[in-house]
Amino acid sequence: MNIKILGPGCRSCVSLERVTREAVESLGLDAQIEKVTDYAAIAGYGVMSTPGLVVDEEVVLDGRVPTAGHVREILEARRV
C-alpha cells in the first residue's frame, strides 16, 4: 500500500502523518508513507485544502485531521 500525506508541513499535516502511522502500525499493514510538500504536486491531486491523504493514488481525505480510528477504517477498507 502506498500512502501519501499532502501538505506543506504545518501542524495539521504533522498530526495527519502521526495518526496515519498509528493506524498502519495497529493494522500491521505493509505500507510506504511519503510526505508530499510540493504545492504543484498537491494541486495535481485536486486538493485545495491541506492536509490530504492519498491511498494508492486515490485522494481519500482532505482539509481536516481525522482520528487514528477513522484512518484505520479508511485503510482497512482498501486493504488488499
Image (spheres, rainbow, N blue to C red):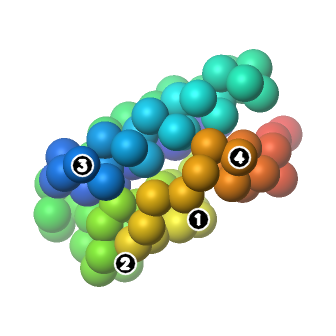
Q: Quadrant of the N terminus?
A: top right
Instruction: Determine whether the residue tagged by mark 4 lies in a helix, strand or loop.
Output: helix
* Dot in front, 4 or 1: 4
The Cα atoms of the two marked residues, 1 and 3, are separated by: 20 Å
The residue at 38%/44% (across/down) is 15
Residue 30 relative to residue 39: left or right: right
Q: Amino acid at mark 2?
A: Gly
* Left or right of 67, for residue 80: right
Where residue 59 appears, as percent x and y from the top left, is 52, 66
In 3D space, how far apart are the residues under numbered discs 4 and 3 (Cα atoms)? 19 Å
Q: Tell me which amino acid carries mark 4.
A: Gly
Q: Which mark is residue 11?
A: 3
Q: Amino acid at mark 1?
A: Val
Residue position for label 4: 69
N-term-proximal mark, 1 vs 3? 3
The first of marks 2 and 4 along the sequence is 2
N-terminal of the pair, mark 2 or mark 3, is: 3
Asked if residue 14 can be seen in this view, the reply is yes
Q: Are marks 1 and 3 in contact (CB under 8 Å)?
A: no
Find out whether the residues at labels 2 and 4 contact each other: C-beta distance under 8 Å.
no
Which residue is the site of mark 1? 60
Q: Residues within 10 Å of mark 3 (few under 14, many from 20)?
A: few
